[in-house]
Image (cartoon, grey):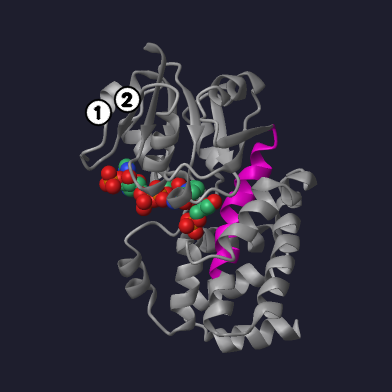
Amino acid sequence: MKEGSVAVIGAGKWGQALHYALSQKQECYITSRTKRDIKNFTDLQTALSCEYLVIAIPAQQIRTWLSNHFEFKGQKILVASKGIEATTGKFLNEIYEEFIPTQNLGFISGPSFAAEVIKGLPCAIVLNSLNKQLFLEFEKFFPNFIKTYYSDDVIGAEICGAYKNVLAIASGICEGMDLGNNARVSLISRGLVEMQRFGSHFGAKMDTFIGLSGAGDLFLTASSELSRNFRVGLGLANNKTLDEILKQLGEVAEGVKTSYAINSLNKKHNIYTPIANEVYSILEGKNPKDSLKDLLKN
Ligand SMILES: NC(=O)C1=CN([C@@H]2O[C@H](COP(=O)(O)OP(=O)(O)OC[C@H]3O[C@@H](n4cnc5c(N)ncnc54)[C@H](OP(=O)(O)O)[C@@H]3O)[C@@H](O)[C@H]2O)C=CC1
Ligand SMILES: O=C(CO)COP(=O)(O)O
């Protein structure tokens, strides 16, 4: 292993933005399935031989990728994805822990649109890990325009990052239906309460929900067309099919599959999640106007 070396795996929007950020203070490699003309683009084996890895591939692909391509050699890893595995209802930390020791794992959360990070605009994120030493090592790699905070609430960060994408779809639907600012902010506020209720069931810390990982990322994603999930919601409100919307998007919108995961988890654990339920139902063909009536009634 090349000591002190850093690589990003996954050269999508977020991977490229993180690569830009992490290249400010040191050399940073990047790799992806599709070869790209980016400085320090390398092959997977070279990237995997780095001591520090930042992995930015979609949540639903992680298990297969880890099974087929990853070999643990003691690397320290920051997970940049946000989502819940739809087929199993597992949070990303649970999947990674099947392949990598917990002490080698950290998870990025907080409000951070790739499109702004890649321009060097300031932002604040949280590096979540049960191993504070891992945070201290990764923290040094981030440029001055990114303020990093530490938290040990891995499960809280995972739930916030995943759930807010579903709520961003709901908010996009609300915007697309022209329901007004009062409705959108009511939805976001109740969404935060719902996300907290869901999180508390799995042992998340309540403070996480009012910080950058929770309210921070939710307010960002649920109020801007820069969010792919918000744009999925806009499309659904305008009667586009999900296939059309996703094809046009051409990038991952994690909230779609995560809605299915939350739907199974809330049934299994009997958690009251009215907004996520309606997003799931709309994805399954319910008319958003009927969802609105049901949300106002219940
Ligand atoms: N964009 C953003 O602002 C932010 C995104 N995130 C999260 O980061 C994750 C990635 O998002 P983002 O980069 O924007 O998504 P994109 O759709 O832009 O890119 C996805 C990346 O994943 C790679 N990929 C897709 N499928 C596989 C697979 N089966 N095996 C290996 N690699 C695969 C693609 O590789 P290739 O193109 O080479 O084929 C591509 O590099 C998501 O979980 C997202 O929620 C988190 C914070 C901010
Ligand atoms: O997580 C994000 C910003 O923090 C990006 O959100 P979208 O995936 O909805 O674009």
Q: Quadrant of the C terminus?
A: bottom right
Q: Residue at x 38, y 48 (%)?
A: 13
Q: Position of residue 183 (x, y in %)?
A: 69, 79
Q: Which residue is mark 2?
A: 47
User: Eyeballing the image, is 16 above or below 217?
Assistant: above
Numbered disc 2: secondary structure:
helix
Q: Is residue 95 left or right of residue 160?
A: left
Dot 2 amino acid type: Ala
At label 2, counting other C-alpha atoms closer than 10 Å, the crowd grade (few under 14, some 14-19, many 20 or more) is many
Number of numbered discs visible in the structure rendering = 2
Inspect this view and state whether residue 288 appears. Answer: yes
Q: Are marks 2 and 1 in contact (CB under 8 Å)?
A: yes
User: Eyeballing the image, is 230 above or below 297?
Assistant: above
At label 1, counting other C-alpha atoms closer than 10 Å, the crowd grade (few under 14, some 14-19, many 20 or more) is some
Q: Decide whether the magenta segment is chiefly helix, strand or loop.
A: helix
Q: Residue at x 39, y 56 (%)?
A: 252
User: Is the CB of mark 1 within 8 Å of ligand 1?
Assistant: no
Kindly indicate the quadrant of the structure image that contains residue 296. Answer: bottom right
Numbered disc 1: secondary structure:
loop
Q: Residue at x 36, y 12 (%)?
A: 2
164 falls in the magenta region:
yes
Magenta segment: 151-169
Q: Which residue is mark 1?
A: 42
